[in-house]
Image (spheres, rainbow, N blue to C red):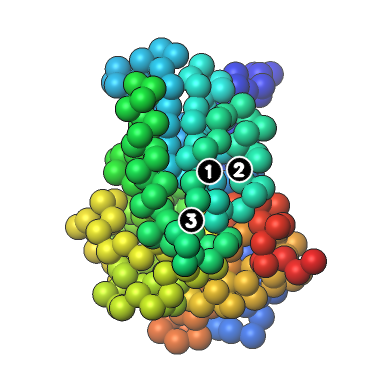
Amino acid sequence: MPSTVAASVLDTIGNTPMVRLDRLTADVDGTVLAKLEYFNPGASKKDRVARRIIEDAERSGVLRPGQPVVELTSGNTGAGLAIACAVLGHPFVAVLSRGSSAERARMIAALGAEVVLVDQLPDSVPGRVSGADLELVELEAQRITEERDAFRSHQFENHSNVEAHYAGTGPEIWYQTGGSLDAFVDFVGTGGCLAGVTRFLRERDPSIRCYAVEPAGAAALAGQPVSEPSHPIQGGGFARADLTHLQGLRLDGHLQVSGDDARVASRLLATREGIFAGFSAGANVAAALQLLRTDLPGATIAVVVPDSGLKYLSTDLWPG
């Protein structure tokens, strides 16, 4: 009998389960299928990206043995990189805004990484990271990278981000659904997941419709005025219309979800489906239900559940 013991925890990344959300769709015509990315070792889809970025950089020689790695993160990529760097022998520095949930920073530190917290702007809302807050984090990440002669993983620009989802998440969704899929929706952070999955699915079936999900009031990709940059949906919705990974990507539409709708959907995922997930999972599910009630009645829609609700216990996502 062949061994099923993984060589390292990196070999357990991917092949996450997909489940039907039949209890949440009981009153609508259609099906929502959720891919549970919190089954990855760092409890998020970003483990895929982190492993691909580090391994690609090592293979190309851009990342030297033992060289430090630095990245701007809202938390999930930082946890994934902390895991990859621990296994592959690189010191890692995660640079976060103080607006990110405390659980994320503590998890990254527990994984052996150095965590640098950057103060938010004076008019920012605690617990909510705006695009302007992220710009401050970017400046600090640049400074540390130069100071320590580090490798910067650049998740917003590094094409390995997209390739991780093109080679992993997309094919898994296709084979798990048997290709019986009408649409895919995804809440946009870096855009890597949306771009990689969309590319793969469209190559298999060009009729599959793919949508970007953004926070209401911060839908820059949809060309709308940004009136609420400090929305509560952590991990994305940074009100950036110029995302590298989405350049040239054909989308079928842009969907907006309010913070309240994302909260409600996340809580319903927990209480009706037993799926304990974060803000962006709620945004994806709310967007999928929105489509079933409007443009795509009767459709089968795939969504990603990006991370675990354990990373948000200190936020207003979960009432005390």
Mark 2, secondary structure of its residue? helix
Camera-side mark, 2 or 1: 1
- In the picture of the structure, the residue carrying the numbered disc 1 is 117
Contact between marks 2 and 1 (CB within 8 A): the answer is yes
Relative to residue 292, is residue 46 depicted above or below?
above
Query: Which quadrant of the view contains residue 14?
Result: top right
Mark 3, secondary structure of its residue? loop
Relative to residue 210, is residue 190 depicted above or below?
above
Residue depicted at x 29% and y 21%? 62
Q: Position of residue 48 (x, y in %)?
A: 48, 39
Question: Hey, what amino acid is under mark 2?
Answer: Ala
Sequence order check: which comes first, mark 2 or mark 1? 2
Contact between marks 3 and 2 (CB within 8 A): the answer is no
- In the picture of the structure, the residue carrying the numbered disc 2 is 105
Mark 1, secondary structure of its residue? strand
Camera-side mark, 3 or 2: 3
For mark 1, does the 10 Å Cα neighbourhood hold few (<14), some (14 to 19), or many (20 or more) residues? some
Q: CA distance from mark 3 to mark 1?
A: 9 Å
Q: Is residue 280 visible?
A: no
- In the picture of the structure, the residue carrying the numbered disc 3 is 120
Sequence order check: which comes first, mark 3 or mark 2? 2
Residue depicted at x 51% and y 16%? 89
Q: Position of residue 205 (x, y in %)?
A: 32, 60
The single residue placed furthest to the left in the displayed view is 248
